[in-house]
């Protein structure tokens, strides 16, 4: 299956905005609290039209398999902390790396320009997207400061 970076971004934005995602407490984990107890189970219901999440949000009629695949890829990329089960994914929270990536592509205009830049380059790898997004933000900062701030 092809990785859909728009869906990756949507999932990260949704996870970040979901107040039910619990944050780990390193002290409790160190004292032996079971990792699994700290997780929020992200259950997907599939109605034939698309995936619906616990809060009722919908990802444009994406298939359950596609959404689960992308959750698994987010786990593999260390963008989220959690566990992969047979037919669902447990998510603890967004990792530091995931937050960094999301901060680089959060703004809709930056994301649009990032995708345009990646298309011109011919690569949609996460590293390319990060580099393009960073370059766009640096240019925006330079323009905003009239070039007074060197980055």
Image: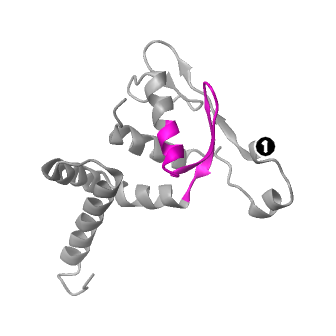
Q: Where is residue 15 in the image (x, y as percent from the top left)?
A: 53, 45
The answer to which of 60 and 25 lies nearer the viewer is 25
Q: Position of residue 126 (x, y in %)?
A: 35, 52
Point out the image quarter for the N terminus: top left
Would residue 118 appear left or right of 66 to someone viewing this image?
left
Q: Residue at x 17, y 49 (%)?
A: 116
In magenta stretch: residue 151: no
Q: Residue at x 86, y 55 (%)?
A: 32
Point out the image quarter for the C terminus: bottom left
Decide: few, some or many residues near mark 1? Use Cα within 10 Å; few <14, some 14-19, many ≥20.
Answer: few
Q: Residue at x 22, y 75 (%)?
A: 144
Q: Where is residue 133 in the image (x, y as percent from the top left)?
A: 28, 60
Would residue 39 appear left or right of 89 to someone viewing this image?
right
In magenta stretch: residue 75: yes
- Residue 23 vs 70, above or below: the answer is below
Q: Position of residue 84 (x, y in %)?
A: 61, 36
Would residue 23 appear left or right of 51 to someone viewing this image?
right
Magenta span: 71-95
Callout 1: SS: helix
Task: Give the residue pinned by disc 1.
Answer: 37
Q: Residue furthest top?
A: 48
């Amino acid at each position: 299956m092809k990785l859909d970076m728009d869906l990756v971004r949507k999932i990260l934005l949704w996870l970040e905005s979901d107040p039910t995602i619990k944050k780990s407490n390193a002290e409790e984990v160190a004292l032996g609290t079971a990792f699994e107890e700290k997780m929020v189970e992200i259950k997907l219901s599939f109605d034939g039209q698309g995936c619906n999440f616990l809060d009722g949000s919908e990802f444009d009629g994406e298939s359950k398999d596609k959404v689960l695949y992308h959750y698994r890829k987010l786990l593999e990329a260390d963008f989220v902390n959690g566990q992969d089960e047979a037919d669902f994914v447990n998510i603890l929270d967004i990792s530091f790396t995931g937050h960094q990536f999301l901060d680089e592509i959060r703004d809709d205009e930056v994301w649009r320009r990032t995708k345009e830049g990646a298309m011109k380059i011919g690569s949609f790898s996460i590293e390319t997207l990060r580099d393009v997004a960073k370059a766009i933000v640096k240019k925006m900062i330079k323009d905003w400061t009239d070039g007074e701030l060197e980055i």
